Amino acid sequence: MKKVVIGMSGGVDSSVAAFILKSEGFDVIGVTMQIWDYDLDAEPSGGCCGLSEIEDARAVCEKLDIPHYVLNFRDIFREKIVDYFAREYLAGKTPNPCIACNRFIKWEALMQKARTIGADYFATGHYCEIDIHPRTGRYTLRRSSNPKDQTYVLYDLDQSQLARTLLPLGYFQKNEVREIAADLGLLVADKPDSQEICFIPDSNHGRFLADYIGKPLTPGNFVDVDGNVLGQHGGVANFTIGQRKGLGMAFGRPMFVKEIHADSGIVVLSDEDAIFVRQLVIDDVNFMAFKRIEGEMKCFGKIRYAHKPAACVIRQENDRVHCIFEAPQRAITPGQAAVFYDEDGYLICGGTIV
């Protein structure tokens, strides 16, 4: 019997994924990561790292009659996720902590733990399908029509990780998963999905960062595209490209964040038309369906989780990938990920927008 360790978040997705794996004959072990850093002011409620989530995961494992363990990843979570989050925002970028968590915590630290106890596979409750690309023979993810498709947040997995990963919810719809949980009598069947960053439950990035670095954020100026000063803001870490709400002052007409310059503290505001652009560059690239890109490749690019993939052309220059979209895209944001798919939905590569 093959042994699989599954990451249990205390939510309905990982709970049903564990049930499916057991039903398929795997020796299933549920593991929940304790990732909250208690040196910070308060533990979050909700998300995927609170004590209530650990208790929910334990209750599900008891119901499914599988072992459950809690592993301490607090130090690496603070180093790889929270420190990275703070560093990027303070540099005027918009980080994606969920992608970083998948890479460094789940598929590196937790998968390594799974190997040490003799597990053949590691599994999660992500809505994703792992496939073999028909032309290259490489492991890759394939985008589906499922509204919950999560290939975007898993673009950073390498070939060895994909080979040892099971994603049992790849062919399921969310309503089907909830129905299975209800039929099993799982208390998490109607549990809401987590929406916020798990270590910032109130979604106030600026306040969190000020507390985290132990001092107020440095104020700076709002300017228009011509350099005229429009007012003062409370720190560049409060903003992201394309933002309209929460600017802290009125301008008499809608204004949007176009550029963030952390070195000078300047946040450039513009009309909405000016935040549409056609080009981007990514670095820290992970190639999945292909080892590299030869020449120019027509494909479809996705610049944020909720973004509908748009037609584009990509080319590789040294360790970076350059992209030109057919039509301008709204608010391409440094620090976020851009992911590219071929015409059949196979994930070509992804990386961090620079």
Image (cartoon, rainbow, N blue to C red):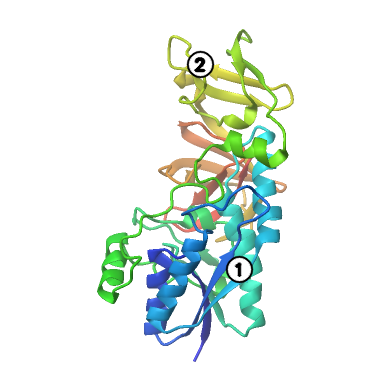
Residue 214, picture quadrant: top right
Residue 313, x across and y down, in percent: 52, 41
- Amino acid, disc 2: Met
Residue 194, x across and y down, in percent: 43, 53
Disc 2 to disc 1, C-alpha distance: 48 Å
Q: Residue at x 35, y 65 (%)?
A: 188
Residue closest to the far front: 41
Q: Nearer the viewer, residue 340 or 152?
A: 152
Q: Could you say which disc has been placed on residue 159 in the image?
A: 1
- Amino acid, disc 1: Gln
Q: Is residue 61 left or right of residue 177?
A: right
Q: Are marks 2 and 1 in contact (CB under 8 Å)?
A: no
Q: Is residue 60 left or right of residue 203?
A: left
Does the image show residue 132? no
First reached walking from the N terminus: tag 2 or tag 1: 1
Q: Secondary structure at mark 1?
A: helix
Q: Is residue 2 left or right of residue 192?
A: right
4 vs 32: above or below: below
Residue 218, x across and y down, in percent: 70, 25
Residue 197, x across and y down, in percent: 52, 48
Few, some or many C-alpha atoms within 10 Å of disc 1 (few <14, some 14-19, many ≥20)?
A: some
User: Which residue matches tag 2?
Assistant: 249
